[in-house]
Amino acid sequence: MNEYIEFTNNHPLLVGSFFAILTLLIFNLFGSRFRGYTVASPADATTLINRSDAVVLDVRTEKEFKEGHIINSIHIPQSSIKDRLPEIEKYKDKPIIVSCRTGQRSGSVCGQLKKQGFGHVYNLAGGVMAWQNANFPLTKK
């Protein structure tokens, strides 16, 4: 035990960096649980859509959405989510899968939806890119 204390005293920057990285790693792995939503893989999302009648909310830009989106998804850009929240209020009791290009922007929207009382919120892991990589269909209609 004395060796650990001595090492910590001799290398405070190294020990501090280790704990900072460890904290970020834990937050990255379990952060969605801390914020109250679940991360869903493309396969999980497909199951939710088919079995639980989940709604897909696409929060990408208009240009990204027009390039291809998940069939029957609702498009509300991330920048407009607060103003257009009443449009999706009717889906509060349904599972909502939030998607963006890579899964990063959608995480913040998931947090906002949980704060607004949406019960079952899922972040599409990897976003639409992961959806495409899984060879799931997109539409431009």
Image: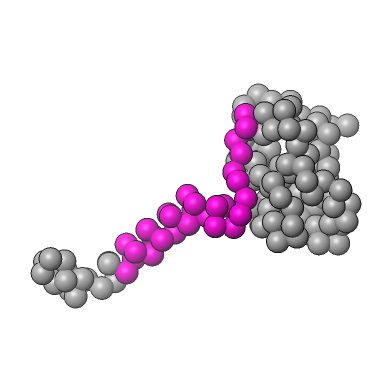
Front-lying residue, 116 or 19: 116
Instruction: Residue 68: say if magenta.
Output: no
Q: Residue at x 49, y 52 (%)?
A: 30
Quarter of the picture containing the N terminus is bottom left
Q: Decide if residue 34 is on the left or right side of residue 51.
A: left
Q: Residue 40: in sight, yes or no?
A: yes
Q: Residue 61: in sight, yes or no?
A: no
Residue 35 screen position, x and y as percent: 59, 57
Residue 110 screen position, x and y as percent: 68, 53
Q: Residue at x 44, y 59 (%)?
A: 24
Q: Decide if residue 1 is on the left or right side of residue 48.
A: left
Residue 99 screen position, x and y as percent: 70, 43
User: What secondary structure prevails in the magenta region?
Assistant: helix
Q: Which residues are drawn in magenta?
A: 16-44
Front-lying residue, 87 or 13: 87
Front-lying residue, 99 or 32: 32
Quarter of the picture containing the C terminus is top right
